[in-house]
Image (tube, rainbow, N blue to C red):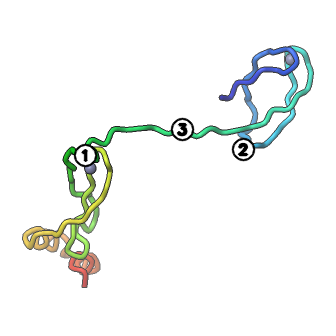
């Protein structure tokens, strides 16, 4: 909350100065009663909760991650889209490896990463 009330007269204020760090204190003058008081900055942390059905007896929905090279060490990285966001590697098929190598013709460095040698 960036709002606070004057501890003397209760007038509502909104902090409009430079951002302050956690537990930093600054003087503030009330525009209603002209009294000086101190405000202390504190941040709050929020957590968002999202369902992950695949972690609760549901099925993971693995999708290949998009990256270059697509195959590293003959493995394709996958991320679950079913809610859990977990990652796993699957072994690329020989066909996928050949297709990848054809696309990487100009990049010998990436070729060796693909094959893992
Ligand atoms: Zn005041
Ligand atoms: Zn999952």
Q: Position of residue 41 (x, y in %)?
A: 74, 37
Q: CA distance from mark 2 to mark 3?
A: 15 Å
The total number of labels drawn is 3
Q: Are marks 2 and 3 in contact (CB under 8 Å)?
A: no
Q: Position of residue 112 (x, y in %)?
A: 25, 81
- 5 up-or-down from 110: above or below: above
Q: Which residue is mark 3?
A: 46
Q: CA distance from mark 1 to mark 2?
A: 38 Å
Mark 1 residue's CB less than 8 Å from ligand 2 = yes
What is the quadrant of the C terminus in the image?
A: bottom left
Q: Position of residue 65 (x, y in %)?
A: 26, 57
Q: Residue at x 71, y 39 (%)?
A: 19
In the drawing, does residue 26 fall left or right of residue 16?
Answer: right
Could you say whether the residue bearing mark 1 is in a helix, strand or loop? helix
Q: Residue at x 27, y 77 (%)?
A: 113
Q: Quadrant of residue 103?
A: bottom left
Residue reaching furthest to the left: 95
Q: Which residue is mark 2?
A: 22
Q: Residue at x 19, y 47 (%)?
A: 59
Q: In the image shown, does 22 or 27 lie closer to the viewer?
A: 22
Q: Quadrant of residue 56?
A: top left
Identify the mark nearer the N-term, 2 or 3. Answer: 2
- 106 up-or-down from 26: above or below: below
Viewer-nearest of labels 2 and 3?
3
Q: Which residue is mark 1?
A: 54
- 9 up-or-down from 61: above or below: above
Identify the mark nearer the N-term, 1 or 3. Answer: 3
């Amino acid at each position: 909350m960036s709002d606070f009330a004057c501890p003397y007269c209760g007038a509502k204020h909104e902090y409009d100065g430079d951002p302050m760090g956690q537990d930093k204190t600054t003087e503030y003058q009330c525009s209603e009663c002209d009294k000086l008081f101190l405000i202390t900055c504190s941040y709050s942390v929020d957590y968002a909760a999202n369902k992950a059905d695949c972690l609760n007896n549901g099925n993971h929905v693995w999708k290949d991650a998009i990256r270059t090279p697509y195959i590293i060490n003959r493995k394709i990285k996958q991320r679950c889209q079913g809610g859990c966001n977990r990652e796993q590697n699957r072994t690329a098929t020989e066909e996928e490896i050949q297709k990848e190598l054809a696309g990487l013709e100009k990049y010998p460095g990436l070729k060796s990463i693909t094959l893992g040698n």
